[in-house]
Image: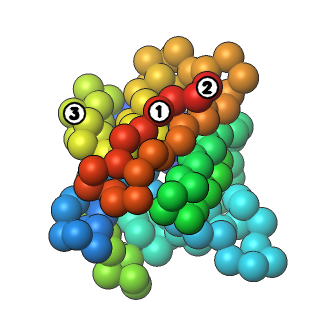
Amino acid sequence: MIPRVGGVDVGGLVLVSNRRKDRSLEWTPPGGVIDRGESIRAGLAREVLEETGLVVTEWADLSYSVIVEAPQLGWRLRVEAWEAADVLGDVVLADPDGIVEEVRQVALPDAITLLANSPQWVHVPVGDWLHGTAHPTGTFHFRVLGSDRRTSTVERLA
């Protein structure tokens, strides 16, 4: 999540601005769906490349994981957030899906501001990780209550 070049922390966090189906924008760390047969780290490296133009050549540790259940919306999400140990290239907009509208490498205080409008299951874990106060188990668990994204509420289970 923090870009490193040649093993050196270059400061900040790379975030992408995603255009949602309702036309709203959400800032999140880069990521996406892992393809069938793809390892999590290989899929994440592919998603980072597609969304930012950066090539992750080595991963550090798993920073945290997130589980989101939305029974009334009919979906369940499982996220693993990994920190990059080595990154090559320059930050560029490169999303083939046309969802990402902007890529920024931001200072940590600015990351908190940009993430404030993202879903709770995005901004809470990232914020805790940035502040060094991650959940003791390393896993965050949320439930979405409701059947409409705009009016649903989110409760944190763990």
Residue 155: mark: 1
Q: Residues within 10 Å of mark 1 (few under 14, many from 20)?
A: few
Q: Which residue is mark 3?
A: 113
Q: Is residue 53 above or below residue 128?
A: below
Q: Earlier in the sequence, mark 3 or mark 2?
A: 3
How many numbered circles are shown?
3
Q: Residue at coordinates 72% horizontally, 61% vertically from top-left?
A: 40
In depth, the one of 47 and 64 nearer the eye is 64
For the residue labelled by badge 3, is the local secondary structure a helix, a strand or a loop? helix
Q: Nearer the viewer, mark 3 or mark 2?
A: 2
Q: Is residue 21 above or below residue 97?
A: above
Residue 6 seen: no
Q: By what rule are the colours in the image chosen?
A: rainbow
Residue 99 seen: yes
For the residue labelled by badge 2, is the local secondary structure a helix, a strand or a loop? loop
Rendered-image quadrant of the C terminus: top right
Q: Residues within 10 Å of mark 2 (few under 14, many from 20)?
A: some
Q: Amino acid at mark 3?
A: Thr
Q: Amino acid at mark 1?
A: Glu
Q: Position of residue 120 (x, y in %)?
A: 39, 38
In depth, the one of 139 and 74 nearer the eye is 74
Residue 158: mark: 2
Q: Are marks 2 and 1 in contact (CB under 8 Å)?
A: no
* Cα separation between marks 1 and 3: 21 Å
For the residue labelled by badge 1, is the local secondary structure a helix, a strand or a loop? strand
